Amino acid sequence: MQKWLIKVLVCAVNAFIIAYIIPEGVEIKDMFSALIVAVMLSLLDAIVKPLLVLLTLPATVLTLGLFLFVINACIILIDDHFVGGFKVENFWYALLFSVLLSFFNSLVHRKAFPEKEKNKKS
């Protein structure tokens, strides 16, 4: 639970920063809205994304996994629909936002949660 909460907080901060970087296409009203965006993203990633991946499996295989970017952008657009203080102009901004958010989240998570070395030599 604690690790999930940290991941949600990191995602909220990253989303807020990315919305500042892309001011004309993505808008997050305040930090509380960014927190709601991050919570909704985690819920959508847990519930809706696996269904979308399953339904679009042939397209994902055919594009060698690149269709997952489209699925991530759709998840961002669904989040935009449900969260009041979050606005994404169109699909392309959602795609850019999802790519940047994934990149920044993975970068921060790699530093915050370093993997323990396997086969550590003494």
Image: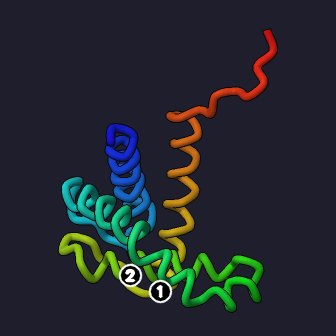
Residue toward you, 79 or 49: 49
Badge 2 crowding class, 10 Å Cα cut-off, few under 14, some 14 to 19, many 20 or more, is: many
Q: Which residue is mark 1?
A: 91
Residue 31, percent across and down?
Answer: 23, 53
- Is 5 above or below relative to 72? above
Amino acid type at circle 1 is: Phe
Q: In the drawing, does residue 31 fall left or right of residue 76?
A: left
Mark 1 or mark 2: whose residue is earlier in sequence: 2
Residue 86, percent across and down?
Answer: 27, 72
Residue toward you, 28 or 76: 76
Which residue: 42% across, 52% down? 14
Badge 1 crowding class, 10 Å Cα cut-off, few under 14, some 14 to 19, many 20 or more, is: some
Amino acid type at circle 2 is: Leu
- Marks 1, 2: nearer the viewer: 2
Residue 45, percent across and down?
Answer: 43, 68
Q: In the drawing, does residue 116 fall left or right of residue 9?
A: right
Residue 17, percent across and down?
Answer: 39, 54
Q: In the drawing, does residue 55 fall left or right of residue 85?
A: right
Numbered tag placed on residue 77 in the rendering? 2
